Image (cartoon, grey):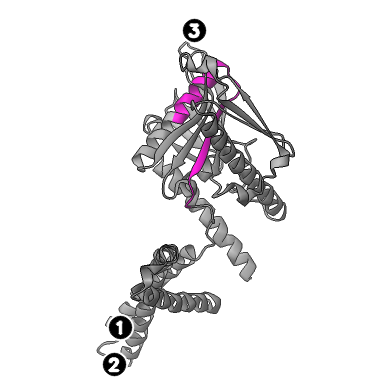
Amino acid sequence: MKPSIAAKLAQLSARLAEVNHLLSAEDATSDMENFRRLSREHAEIGPVVELYEAWQRNRRDIASAQEMTADAEMRELAEAEIKEGRERAAGLEAELQRLLLPRDPNDERNIFLEIRAGTGGDESALFAGDLFRMYARYAERSRWQVEVVSHSPGEQGGYKEIIAKVVGNGAYSRLKFESGGHRVQRVPATETQGRIHTSACTVAVMPEADELAEVQINPAEIRIDTYRSSGAGGQHVNKTDSAVRVTHLPTGIVVECQDDRSQHKNKAQALSILAARIKDRQLRERQVKEAAERKSLIGSGDRSERIRTYNFPQGRVTDHRINLTLYKIDQIMDGELDELVRALLAEHQAEQLAAMAEEAA
């Protein structure tokens, strides 16, 4: 193990002991915010220190086995233990390196999920509806909550656009690689000659901003318009201007919310989405700057790229960033995304490890 990694692990071990002491103090819960912060830190570094202690025990076992090689009768057994210990050490060191990778500070945040129909007309809107159902089913499997914030129905079903808030532990960490262009190849229900059509949608996954102040929205730089909702709502929509449109003048970002009957709630929701979009733009600008120095395989979030194709006639889903094809389209469209999510995360971590190796070289 490299000295720099060993030193960092020793620091984490000492810090865990300090956190344990603070959490066990009699007045630990007098400041609940500090108690929660320490608990989160304990949950984060505990598994790393536990693995580090396993590595240390394994190293001691190897040293003991090496001492046994001096005994001719025990040499063969000792050499077998040394070989096994070194193989175990390699695995432990690789896992420790993975756990020490820099964490995305947004990983544990809730998200705003935006799906927009692209090329393909009605079929694209139907596909947008299918994608939303796919993510909603995945959220359900993950025990997350999904709240539709705004939607514009397609003429034949599906959505021209839908925005939803997904609330759940680790939502951003597991869905952040979904941003981009999604393409579908299938025979539409309205196709009489059985021809395969290609349509597309764009997906945006944005971490929720903790507070509007986090992205520093200047009230003088936004315009808020109200208008009558065009959706369902009976007589109510004809009497009140409950729908809200917020325009961020410096960036031109426009957010509309009309799903709630309360103008106040629509405004609050629109401002939350605006904050998330501005934060997302800032993240992507930073990623583009970093990519200029070193090309990022899947971390760029560039929505102009086609990231995935869903081919229904062949029953396959292909993620073009990692060249992964799975012949289980029905299961994936029903929300079984774990295999894709794990593969994308593994590739991202491999890239981070490669970058660490380059910096250390």
Residue at 42 percent across and 32 percent down: it is: 134
Q: Residue at x 65, y 43 (%)?
A: 281
The magenta stretch spans residue 299: no
* Residue projecting furthest to the front: 239
**Residue 19: mark:** none
CA–CA distance between discs 2 and 1? 9 Å
Specify the amino acid type for callout 3: Gln
Q: CA distance from mark 1 to mark 3?
A: 73 Å
Determine contact: label 3, label 2, CB under 8 Å: no
Give the mark nearer the N terminus: 1 vs 3.
Answer: 1
Quarter-of-image position of residue 40: bottom left
Identify the residue position indicated by label 2 in the image: 71
Region of the chain picked out in magenta, as a range: 108-132
Q: Is residue 166 above or below residue 260?
A: below
Q: Amino acid at mark 2?
A: Asp
Task: List x then y, in percent, for residue 194.
Answer: 47, 11
- The percent coordinates of residue 128 (x first, y second) are 50, 26
Q: Nearer the viewer, residue 190 or 89?
A: 190
* Label drawn at residue 78: 1
Label 3 belongs to which residue?
193
